[in-house]
Image (cartoon, rainbow, N blue to C red):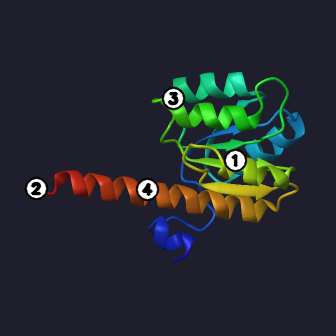
Amino acid sequence: MDDRTLLGDAPLGRLNGACILVVDDEEEIRTFLTTLFADHGAAVLEASDGVQALEIAIRSRPDLITLDLSMPGVDGIETFSRLRTEDETAEIPVCIITGHPEFRKVIYDRPVTPPEGFIEKPCDPDHVVRSLHRILGLEKRKKERSRSTARTP
C-alpha cells in the first residue's frame, strides 16, 4: 500500500496541515526539518531539548514528534520514555531522527511502545517526508478503526 492510499487524495509528500514537533539540539537540523515540513504543508513547532519538548507536547498535542536522541540534559532516550508514559502524550506518534544508529536497540528495548519510525542522519529529505507521511497515514487509519469499533454494538 502506498502513501497516497493511506492518506486518500492527498498528493504524495504533502503533510496536509499536520502539526509536527521537531526536537533537536542542533539549530541547523531543526531549521532543515522545520523548513522541509513547512514546505510540505505542515504546521511546525520546535524544541531544542527534552524538557522543552515535553512541555510543548503536553500543551500543544502535536500530530507527530520527530526526536533526536543525542541531546544535552534530558536526552532523547529519556524524553521518548517520558512521552510514552505521560497520559497526554502517550498516543502521539514519534519518529526518531538520529545520527546514532546504535541507539536503535536502546529505544526498542524500552518497556514502552516503540517509536513509529526510526531514521538515521544524515537523511534524505524525500525519505523523511515519505516516512512521516506513512506514519501520519497509519495513525489516521488506526483512529478511524478505533472510532468504527467503538460505534459497533
Work out whether mark 2 precedes mark 3 in sequence or the reverse, and give the earlier one: 3
Q: Earlier in the sequence, mark 3 or mark 4?
A: 3
Q: In this picture, is 134 found above or below 121?
A: below
Q: How many marks?
A: 4
Q: Alpha-carbon neighbours of circle 1 within 10 Å: few (<14), some, or many (≥20)?
A: many
Please name the residue that numbered disc 1 is placed on.
Answer: 107
- Mark 1 and mark 2 residues within 8 Å of each other at the beta carbon: no
In front: label 1 or label 2: 1
Identify residue for label 4. 140
Q: CA distance from mark 3 to mark 4?
A: 21 Å
Residue linked to disc 3: 86
What separation in Å lies between label 2 and label 3 (alpha carbons)? 31 Å
Disc 4, SS: helix
- Residue in the image at 56% along x and 43% along y: 112
On screen, residue 19 versus residue 40, left or right, reads: left
Q: Earlier in the sequence, mark 1 or mark 2?
A: 1
Chain-order first, disc 4 or disc 1: 1
Amino acid at dot 2: Pro
| CB atoms of marks 4 and 1 within 8 Å | no
Residue 100 shows up from this direction: yes
Q: Give the residue at the far left of this rendering.
A: 153
Tell me, yes or no, if residue 45 can be seen here. no
Label 3: how many residues lie within 10 Å, few (<14), some (14-19) or many (20+)? few
Front: mark 1 or 3:
1
Crowd tier of the residue under label 4, counting other residues whose Cα lies within 10 Å: few below 14, some 14–19, many 20 or above: some
Vertical arrangement, residue 41 with respect to residue 73, above or below: below
Q: Identify the residue position indicated by label 2 in the image.
A: 153
Q: Are marks 3 and 4 in contact (CB under 8 Å)?
A: no
- The reply to whether the C-beta atoms of the residues labelled 2 and 3 are less than 8 Å apart is no
Q: Amino acid at mark 4?
A: Lys
